[in-house]
Amino acid sequence: VKCIGILTSGGDAPGMNAAIRAVTRTCLNKGIKVYGVRLGYKGLHDGDFIEFDSHSTRNIINIGGTFLKSARFPEFKDPEVRKEAIEQMKKVGMEALVVIGGDGSYNGALKLTEMGINCIGIPGTIDNDIPDTDFTIGFDTALNTIVDALDKLRDTSSSHQRCTILEVMGRRCGDLAVHAGLACGAEMIVTSESGFDEAEIIETLKRSKASDKKHALVVITEHITDVHALAKRIEEATGFETRANVLGHMQRGGSPTARDRVLATRLGIKAVELLEEGKGGLCVSDVKGEIIGLPIEEVLSHKRKVNQGIYEDVLKLR
Ligand code: ADP
């Protein structure tokens, strides 16, 4: 392969820049031309390309977000639109593509591969919701942001003897909530995997209030329930003064942690190596610390495996 493009797509995640840097440097070291594609698949369609040299990705390894920008571009599901994108790629000689994003972005990469353009997906999402990889780029940074917030909430929660609820991101994946909850000693952790049992939450909080521990932290994944309404119901049922907080987009930002930078760098290198071997339709995964390529089609057909051990450990401390 002589010329590769790289883009970031879907939700942004800290560490995407480190992955862009690793892909770029690996390409340049191998004598492969590399283009940055701005604004995800939209930029691919519009021919919004920047040829990268060794200066292009300087001083970005520690910066959050994605300097190539990301966009949602549902039009890319249309085969005609993808054909137009391929025309743009051909104009500059771009033969293959690295796509950093979530499962939606993986779908686009698979479709392009089926049309003759080898693509490799890199898991970039704070939610950690991609099957067959232990971690995605951005998860660790977001987790640490949540831990920071929960530690601060604990200070005020315990001073006022309150119950504090924190809603965190994750879409359908409870990994952020369960890891943060364990790291911060939360009384209750509610995710789509643990299930939402309001009676159980209230029972646990009543027990907590009756003990000598006069405050409580509850961590809950987004899209499960209205946390402000839940706070009111908990207050009524338990007598615990209760406050709900939604952490929001702060979780997407910040300088990536060392773990995320290392993961992003290793995934980026592997993606280029696979393209160099003439492979496409694969995504790179971190499986027990080893970086491997797996077929996107297979990965997308799997349900993400829940780490049962961590949920069992949550119950052991209740
Ligand atoms: P994420 O990659 O974070 O899951 P999205 O689901 O929004 O985010 O997908 C990102 C982009 O990937 C979409 O805006 C679209 O351009 C492209 N995409 C998603 N699904 C498909 C699909 N089935 N076919 C082609 N492109 C897709």
Image: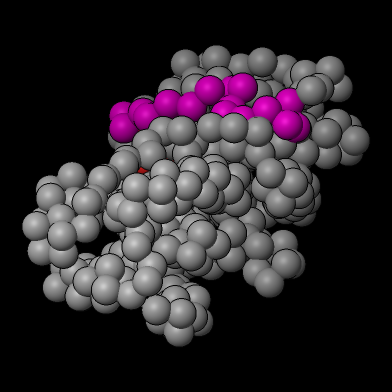
Q: Position of residue 100 (x, y in %)?
A: 57, 41
Pick the front one: 162 or 85: 162
Give the residue displayed 90% in from the left and 35% down from the top.
Answer: 29
Range covered by the magenta-colored residues: 60-76
Give me the residue at 35% from left, 59% from top. Answer: 215
Q: Main structural element of the magenta stretch: helix, strand or loop? A: loop
Figure quadrant of the C terminus? bottom left
In reply to whether residue 266 is colored magenta, the answer given is no
How is the protein colored in the picture?
one colour
Q: Is residue 61 magenta?
A: yes
State the residue at coordinates (31%, 71%): 208
* In the foreground, 249 or 209: 209
Quarter of the image where ligand 1 sits = top left
Residue 112, how many percent across, how many down? 48, 42
Q: Quadrant of the N terminus?
A: top right
Q: Is residue 209 left or right of residue 46?
A: left
Q: In the rendered view, would you say 198 is above or below 249? A: below
Is 257 left or right of 205, judged from the image as shown? right
Tally the marks.
0
Residue 251 visible in the current orientation: yes
- Pick the front one: 280 or 198: 198
Residue 265 percent location from the top left of the image: 75, 45
Is 314 above or below relative to 184? below
